[in-house]
Structure formats: C-alpha cells, structure tokens
Image (spheres, helix red, strand yellow):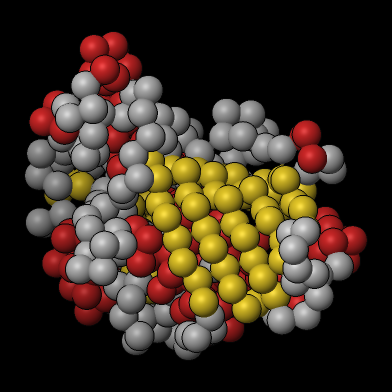
Amino acid sequence: MSTNIAIIGATGAVGSEFIKVIEHLKFEFDELYLVASARSAGQMIVNNLGNFVVQDIETFDFSTITYAFFTAGGSVSKEWAEKAVNAGATVIDNTSAFRMDPLVPLIIPEVNLSSYKQEKLIANPNCSTIQIVRALKPIDELFGLDKVIISTYQAASGAGNAGIEELHASMLNENESENENAAETSTVFSRPLAHNVIPQIDKFLDNDFTFEEEKVRFESRKILAAKNLFITCTAVRIPVFIGHSAAVYVETIEDIDLEKLSVSFAEIPDIELSNTASSFPTPRLIASQDKVYIGRMRKEPNTPKGVWLWVVANNLWVGAALNAVRIAQQLQKNTL
C-alpha cells in the first residue's frame, strides 16, 4: 500500500521545517506534495527530497493522500481539514483549530499515543505545550501532579515567517526601542519586539488571560488526562528568532526525589538534562533540534513537594513539525 503525504502551508516557517524533519526522520513515503494558497501556487521548491511545484489548495486532490500535515493557519484548517478527511486522508493538524475539540485527539506520541482511537483527524499540540508536557510527564508518573505554574519565553518564529521578518525589521530600527507606545509600527506583535519583552501572545480573553495562555492550560490537561489539574501560565514573546523557553514550577502529590527524577529524565533519549546549575540550556546554544533540554532543576526550599525546571526546545521542530511527523510514523507502524 502506497503512502502519499501532503504539507499544507509548505511555504511557511513551519511548513519548510516539515520537509527537513521528514528527511531527518527518514519517514517512508511514495509521493510528497507541497500545497499552499493561490498566491504561492506554482512556486518551485528544490530540496534534498526532490523538486516540487507548490500546488493550489483550491484545486488539490486529497483523495490520493495518506497523511496531510496542515500548518497554514487555523482558518485554512477549519475550511479544508474535514474536506481532506472526507476525501480519505488522515489529517494531522498543526494549528489551534481542533485542539480544544473533545472529539479530536491531541497527541504527543511519547506521552499519550494510547488516547488515539483510529480517528482520521488528529491535532498537534501548541509548540510550548509539547516541550512543557514532555517535562511534566515523568514528574507525574513518579510523584503525581498537584499544581503547575508556567512562564513561557517564546521566539518570534512562533508567529511564523511574518514574526521572523518583523523581528528582523524592528532590529534594524533602533528608534523603535525607545518608543513604548509604538504599537502602530508592529503588524504582527502588539509592540515592537526588538530590544523588548511583550507579555502578550495572541488575543486577550474575557478573563484577561491570552488565548496562548489558555491553550497551554487546556492542552496540558487534555494530554495528561488531568482535567482538574491546577495549571496556569503567563506567555511572553521575546526577541529571539527560534527556540521557546519556559520556567516551570511544579508541586506534586508525593515528596520529590530529585535523584530519582534525574534518572527518569536520563532514560528518555530525546530529553537532555543539564548536570549542573550553571550548565543551563538557552535557545541559541541548544545542540539538537529534536531534543527537549531541561536545566536549573532545583527543589523549592519551602516545600518538599516543589520543583523548578527551565525547559528549552526548538519550537519549529519539537514544538511543531517533529511531533506531527512522529505521529504519522506511529500510525504508519500500526497500519503497514
């Protein structure tokens, strides 16, 4: 049986990383199709997998597709994902369109693959959620989770190519850093990002949290099957091009044994724990695009049930393309 795959949003920041991840993971396929909106259709893309002409989503035939990776934005997924499913494809959606739908599985293969029940539409979690939950899962298994408080520090690429381009542009304009009220000069972020820190990602909700913060809260509960877990988040945009970071405070049901937790992290191939307090990871210096890096792990002095973590990962790989392609690989193993 042939395996044909399509990347919808192939010309975007994450879409281009999908191509690299497919090659990196040696994902087996027969045909690969790159799909985008009409304005990108006809563009030639040359990479190590071959030469591809970008196809227009309006006329693309999904009936030949085994796995369709959607990464063109929530509005595109809402319009086209179910059409692709109805045509016979299994859709792995990298947007926020279906993550909160109770009927759509939200999957991190290393954490909750067992929650997949042969659905044809699968949601890929938010970029920050993936790296945070990867760090939370071993803690939950060993000691049980009681409370989680998170501050994220997220790169410009979380807003796609537009975010990367705007950070480049704003870094060239030194005067923007002196104007705190220069929101009108930014079309992607609510303030100029260069030389700045913005405590807002996505729109504000009625409860004064942002949608990004609610995504981290809701998605973590869904993936961990912990609907009553106390979890809260402040999401912050920082002037970094690639690589999300998170300061994570956890309180557990049982007392924490740091040595036991360290051993558990060390047994997971794609998690790397810093050995000393001063060897913490940073977005610029992480060595591998497909690992979750954990540092600054320390017990909270005021309670035997508290632990702090600093978690860093490449948001375009670990937080998007890598997780999505790993989902497809697991499905492929079970169906071939």
> On the rendered structure, is 293 left or right of 96?
right
Percent x, y for residue 215?
A: 37, 65
Quarter of the image for residue 289 reads: top right
Name the residue at 41% across, 73% down: 218
In this rendered view, identify the residue nearer to me: 91 or 163.
163
Residue 274 higher or lower than 99, as above or below: above
> On the rendered structure, is 115 left or right of 33?
right
Q: Is residue 46 visible?
A: no
Percent x, y for residue 93?
A: 34, 64
Q: Is residue 273 visible?
A: yes
Name the residue at 27% across, 76% down: 85
In this rendered view, identify the residue nearer to me: 253 or 113.
253
Quarter of the image for residue 106 reads: bottom left
> On the rendered structure, is 230 left or right of 121?
right
The number of callouts visible is 0
Single out the residue that lies furthest toward the front. Answer: 302
Name the residue at 59% across, 57% down: 248
Percent x, y for residue 111?
A: 61, 72
Residue 305 higher or lower than 278, as above or below: below
Name the residue at 26% across, 52% down: 202
Residue 54 higher or lower than 48, as above or below: below
Percent x, y for residue 151?
A: 49, 52
In this rendered view, identify the residue nearer to me: 115 or 42.
115
The C terminus - image quarter: bottom right
